[in-house]
Each structure stands twice: as C-alpha cells, then as structure tokens.
Image: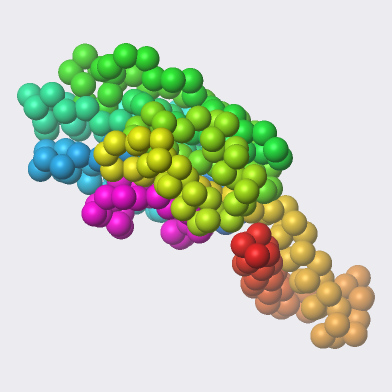
Amino acid sequence: MLIAAREADVGVVNTGRRGNPPDAPYFALEMEPGDSGGPVFAAAVCSEGETPEELDIRRYAMGLLHEFFRRREEVVRSTDYRVVLRNSLRHIHRHIVESHGESGLGLDFLLVLADAQRLYAARCGENALFVHSGEETAALFGGWEGEGGLLGDAAGERIELGEAPVHPGDVVVLCNPPVARVMGARDVGVILRRARDSRKAALFLSAIAERKGAQGTMVALVWEMPNYRGAAMLAEEAAQGEGAAASGVLPEQKGEAEEEKEAFGEEEHAEKAKRQWLSKWRRRKEE
C-alpha cells in the first residue's frame, strides 16, 4: 500500500515567479518503500509559459500528476512503471488537444519515477535527465532532434522512455529546456563532484547555466538517493534490541500472546528509527 508522499528534500533551481506546485513548473515527492518495495521518488519538470493558455495546461498537468503520485495505489500495484509514465503523459496530451487544440500549444515534459533499485523516466520535448553514480555522470536521453512532438501538438506526442539502475548516494538531476540546452553530463558531473549537497549543487548549476547563456525560466531538481536498505537494517536491529532490553527475556522465550501484544509497538519503533536514520544520513551528507 502506498505510504502518503511528502515533498522531497531536493535542491531546486527555479528562476520563475511561481514557486509551489501545481503553479510551479516542477514537483518532487518522496515515499517510504513498503515491505514489498514500491516507488520512493516521483518528480517532473516542464517548460514554462506566460500566456493564460500555457499556464492553464501546465497547472493541469502538474496538479494531476502531483495528486496521482501522492494518492493513487495503482502506482504501487503496477508491474511496469514505464507504462504508468507513458500513460500519464498521453492523458495530459489528450487533455491539451481537447481543451486547447486550436491554439497550437506544446508542452515539454519530463516525468521520473524511482524505486530503491531503478529509475524510470518519460520525456516529451527538450528536457534532460542526468544520473551521477560514483564519479561518473550520464545523460539518460540524447539530444532532442527537431521540433514538434510535444504534449498537445496536433500531430501527436513523441514520448521517449528510459531507465537506469540507481544506488544509495547516486544523484539525479532533472532539467527543463533552458537548462538542458546549455548543460551537459560533463558540466553536471563537475558540479556534483564539488558540491554533493543537493541545495549547494542547485546553486552552482543555476550560476553556471546562466553564465553559459541559458535563456528563459530555468528549472532543475537535484535529488540524492537515500540508503533505504541501511535504514531498514537499522530499524530491524533497533526493534529487536528494544524488545529484548525492555523485558530481559529472549524473543524465543516469549509466549505467542505476548509477542502479538508487542508486535505493533515494535513495528512503530522500527519505523521511527528508520525515519531518524534517514534524517541523520541526509544531515551528514550536507556537512
């Protein structure tokens, strides 16, 4: 079952006037993985427009996806996250065509979903996605060739799908078109080797993109993959130690009724220990 999502701890580049989803041209959510896995991160960036029609379609797209990944259990039950991403973008495309088909509007969009082992992405337009692992940085997509194929284009959308393995400590960077046009994998790699903290990296990225001539509203998200496995192991050990220390009796010596009585308390303690460990892990990364 999907645990309620929360706003992600990310570094944000946003030179526009709108700072909060769904008005902002981005969102980022974090979710705690359940016992059977499930998504841990969902995010999106898109092109920024100023006309009433452009703002309307962007608000619709961001609002729809923001709530979908916050609440919909279908995401967890899905066996193919790439299908979830593609269908989400196609739904937005159909809405734009039906409501603004005569305006000729097109929306660049990058949508990302990750579990504890892999990152999945769907792109429509000139956005860029980078994964920094160890000392290497790679772009998940190539350059966007030509025009057209955006969400809402009358000729139909052109959606690219990609995926990559991710590990604790890997950094994911989503860039909208103005940033993607001037920043490459080498640039992002240099930034992340010098500033591993996501917020500091976002500041460096914004400054360098501007220096390289980025035009328009710049939007980028920088997120670091937490060590969920380490947190889960610590939580398990904490729960076991707490139960034994409180009673002075080894687990195998307890009766079934007593074990059942303590089960919910240990589970709650384990989740608390896990959240505390993740918080400390993030703070250590920022130092």
Instruction: Tell me the residue at 20%/39% (across/down).
Output: 49
- In terms of depth relative to the viewer, which is nearer, 86 or 286? 286
Quadrant of the drawing holding the C terminus: bottom right
Q: Position of residue 147 (x, y in %)?
A: 28, 17
Check if residue 222 falls in the magenta segment: no
- In terms of depth relative to the viewer, which is nearer, 266 or 14? 14
Quarter assignment of residue 269: bottom right
Instruction: Tell me the residue at 36%/26% (across/down).
Output: 126
Q: Residue furthest front?
A: 211
Name the main secondary structure of what is drawn in magenta. Answer: loop
Looking at the image, can residue 252 be seen?
yes
Residue 100, above or below 148: below
- In terms of depth relative to the viewer, which is nearer, 112 or 38? 112
Check if residue 11 falls in the magenta segment: yes
Q: Position of residue 240 (x, y in %)?
A: 82, 71
Stretch in magenta: 2-31
Instruction: Tell me the residue at 53%/56% (across/down).
Output: 200
Looking at the image, can residue 80 be seen?
no
- In terms of depth relative to the viewer, which is nearer, 135 or 99? 135
Q: Residue furthest left?
A: 102
Residue 38, above or below 104: below
Q: Position of residue 57 (x, y in %)?
A: 19, 39
Instruction: Tell me the residue at 39%/20% (across/down).
Output: 144
Q: Position of residue 201 (x, y in %)?
A: 53, 50
In screen coordinates, is 24 left or right of 258?
left
In screen coordinates, is 219 left or right of 40?
left
